[in-house]
Amino acid sequence: MGKLKYPESGTPKRKKPHEVTALRLDSAPLSTEMSEYFKKCEEKIGFVPNVLIAYSHSMAKLETFAAFYNELMLAPSGLSKLEREMIGVVVSAENRCFYCLVAHGAALRSLSGKPELGEAIAFNYRMAEIEPRQRAMLDFALKVSRASAEITEADREKLREAGFNDADIWDIAATASFYAMSNRMASATGMSPNPEYHGQARG
C-alpha cells in the first residue's frame, strides 16, 4: 500500500471501515481535529493505522479512542513508552489478537531496536531478557487480562517492591485493561492489520 494522497481540500483519501473490518460500516466525515491527526500519522509512519480507519465510522468513537490511546501510551508516566508497548503485546498475546500483536509487535521491535526482544515478548515474555522490574509489571498485566478478580493487595505490593509507585500501578492496570478491550473489539470485528507492520524493524 502506498502513501495516502491528500487533495487540495485537505480531506484525506482513505480506506473505509468496511475495508478493514468484517462489518458493513461507512466512513463518517472527519472532523478537523481527526483530519489533522490522520495527516500526522501519514507524515510520521507513512500510513493511517487500520484501527483508526475502523473507528472512523463515528467521530465520537474515533475521537474518544484516539484521546484515550494517546493519554495511555504517549503521555508522561512512570512507565516508558517501551514498557507500555510490552504490556500491550503481552496482553494481546494472551488474548490471541492478531491485529494488536502485529501492530504493537512492530512498535515494540522499533522502540527497543531489538527484533528478538519483540518476538520473545510476543511469544513468551518469560523467555525475554528484561529487567526484574519489567517482569513483575508483565506478570501483573497478564493477571489483569487473565484473572483480574483474583488480584489482591499482595499483587500490588509485589509491584511496589519492584520499584513502582501507586500511580505507576494505575498506569499498568489501565494499559492492560485498554488492550484487553481493544483485543476483543479487533477480534470481534475482524479487524485486519496494515500490511506495512509485518516487515517493520526486523533487520
Image: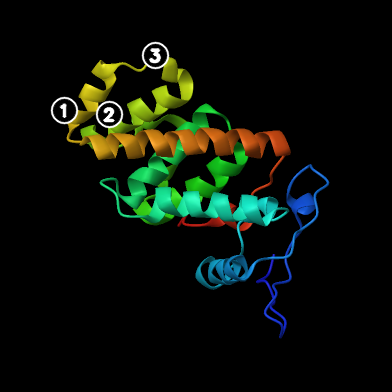
The tag earlier along the polypeptide, 3 or 1, is: 3
State the residue in front, 191 or 123.
191
Marks 1 and 2 sit apart, C-alpha to C-alpha, by: 9 Å
Q: Is residue 104 above or below residue 15?
A: above
For the residues carrying marks 2 and 3, which lies nearer the camera in this image? 3
Seen as rendered, the residue at the extreme front is 60
Q: Which quarter of the rendered picture does the N terminus lie within?
A: bottom right
Tell me residue 5's x, y (percent).
69, 76
Badge 1: few (under 14), some or many (20 or more) residues near its Cα, within 10 Å?
Answer: few
Q: Which residue is mark 3?
A: 150
The kind of secondary structure element at disc 2 is helix
Residue 109, visible in the rendered structure: no
Marks 3 and 1 sit apart, C-alpha to C-alpha, by: 19 Å
Residue type at mark 2? Ala
State the residue in front, 128 or 92.
92
Residue type at mark 3? Glu
Q: Is residue 196 above or below residue 133?
A: below
Tell me residue 51's x, y (percent).
62, 51
Task: Kindly indicate whether the residue at mark 2 contacts the one at mark 1 (C-beta within 8 angstroms).
Answer: yes
Q: Residue at image x 52%, y 57%?
A: 200
The tag earlier along the polypeptide, 2 or 3, is: 2
Seen as rendered, the residue at the extreme top is 150
